[in-house]
Image (cartoon, rainbow, N blue to C red):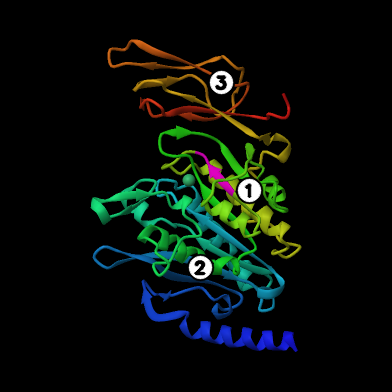
């Protein structure tokens, strides 16, 4: 009795959603939707939609591009639902082609009718940051301020007292990801911030079942076992019980083709692991993996900090092993005098290195990862 009541309610809800999913407008030929109801999306098809995450001052909508690869009809229920999202930080661009190229390469297998499950992709989550060519989201209120969108998920609606930035996150969380109901495994693609260099690495909260497997499938250079950041996309998924990682794809700004290719290859391994691909399927790209045995597992960061503002010259590179106390770089003043000799704060492996010479006091210039449980 309860079950049948629930299914009738579900059917009514689905019908109501279906009536409001499409606004009737299109942009560049693709439908504008108010929220994503996967039941409205055609099977065996890769669909493209726009959704307005918020309206900027002046009434200009921030339209986000949404890919949906839907597999065979029954696989909406029986298959897995994967989210691939990128560039919530507007200067972090390597994840954008990963999402774009995966969907382009999925076209044939999806249209063949042999794709088992659903993939939702948002290649550019922070349109505002992309416009301003920087990390955060600009609000024009109060003479203007910036918000790190990756600290405000799952967001807050305007009705609940949210701001433009928090309601923007709320729209992504609720109207695209259905408050986690549209997704049961997720990867959020990032890079380092502008001004640093680094390898392919991921944050993974091993406390949730499924996250370790997800992290190991990356075959990243470094797996940082990490409790996460409150309000980040990854940690919000984990809080909702959805296995998720943050995959950091090298430096900001310039597309690093090697790391982009390795990230795509990870997605193919993941799709295979989730049984979304036919058994005889061969991923449409050459192997670039380094192998899981070469992933460095670490639990801790050690950060070297510039004590005074000046010009920094680093003399270590990402993935170099260093010893505690080892000289790693020098900070100079405007006369060229040495004002700080930088040393490694721990023995471990170099993760990120500052490459922007202009450095302010208090800024991190080097991150070393190490495993506290191994020493
Ligand atoms: Zn980021």
Q: Give the mark nearer the N terminus: 3 vs 2.
A: 2
Residue 37 in the image: state x and y as whole percent.
Answer: 54, 76
Distance from disc 1 to disc 2, alpha carbons, whole Å, reads 37 Å
For residue 45: magenta?
no
Residue under the image location 37 percent in, 25 percent down: 361
In front of the other: 157 or 188: 157
Q: Answer yes or no: do the residues labelled 1 and 3 have beta carbons within 8 Å?
A: no
Residue 285 in the image: state x and y as whole percent.
Answer: 61, 52
Left or right: residue 135 versus residue 230 is left
Q: Give the mark nearer the N terminus: 1 vs 3.
A: 1
User: Is residue 258 shown above or below 176?
Assistant: above
Q: Give the mark nearer the N terminus: 1 vs 2.
A: 2
Task: Report if residue 113 is visible in the image.
Answer: no
Residue under the image location 72 percent in, 49 percent down: 213
Residue 103 in the image: state x and y as whole percent.
Answer: 55, 62
In front of the other: 71 or 4: 4
């Amino acid at each position: 009795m309860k079950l049948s009541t629930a299914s009738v309610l579900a059917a009514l809800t689905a019908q109501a959603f279906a009536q409001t999913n499409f606004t009737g407008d299109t942009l560049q030929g693709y439908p504008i939707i108010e929220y994503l109801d996967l039941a409205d999306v055609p099977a065996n098809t890769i669909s493209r939609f726009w959704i307005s995450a918020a309206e900027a001052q002046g009434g200009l909508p921030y339209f986000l591009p949404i890919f949906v690869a839907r597999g065979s009809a029954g696989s909406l229920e029986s298959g897995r639902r994967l989210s691939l999202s990128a560039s919530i930080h507007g200067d972090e661009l390597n994840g954008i082609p990963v999402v774009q190229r995966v969907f382009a390469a999925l076209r044939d297998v999806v249209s063949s009718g042999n794709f088992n499950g659903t993939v939702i992709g948002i290649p550019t989550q922070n349109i505002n940051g992309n416009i301003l060519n920087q990390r955060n989201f600009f609000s024009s209120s109060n003479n203007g301020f910036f918000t790190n969108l990756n600290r405000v998920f799952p967001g807050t609606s305007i009705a609940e007292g949210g701001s433009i930035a928090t309601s923007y996150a709320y729209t992504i969380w609720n109207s695209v990801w259905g408050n986690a109901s549209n997704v049961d495994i997720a990867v959020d693609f990032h890079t380092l911030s502008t001004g640093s260099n680094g390898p392919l690495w991921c944050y993974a909260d091993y406390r949730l079942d499924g996250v370790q497997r997800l992290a190991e499938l990356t075959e990243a250079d470094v797996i940082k076992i990490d409790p996460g950041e409150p309000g980040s996309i990854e940690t919000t998924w984990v809080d909702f019980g959805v296995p998720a990682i943050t995959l950091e794809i090298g430096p900001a700004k310039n597309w690093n083709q090697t790391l982009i290719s390795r990230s795509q290859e990870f997605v193919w391994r993941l799709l295979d692991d989730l049984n979304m691909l036919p058994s005889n399927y061969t991923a449409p790209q050459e192997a670039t993996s380094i192998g899981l045995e070469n992933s460095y597992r670490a639990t801790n960061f050690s950060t070297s900090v510039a004590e005074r503002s000046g010009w920094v010259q680093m003399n270590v590179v990402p993935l170099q092993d260093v010893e505690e106390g080892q000289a790693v770089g020098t900070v100079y003043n405007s006369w060229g005098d040495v004002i700080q000799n930088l040393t490694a704060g721990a023995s471990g492996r170099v993760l990120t290195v500052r490459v922007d010479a202009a450095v302010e006091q208090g800024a991190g210039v080097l991150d070393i990862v190490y495993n506290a449980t191994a020493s």
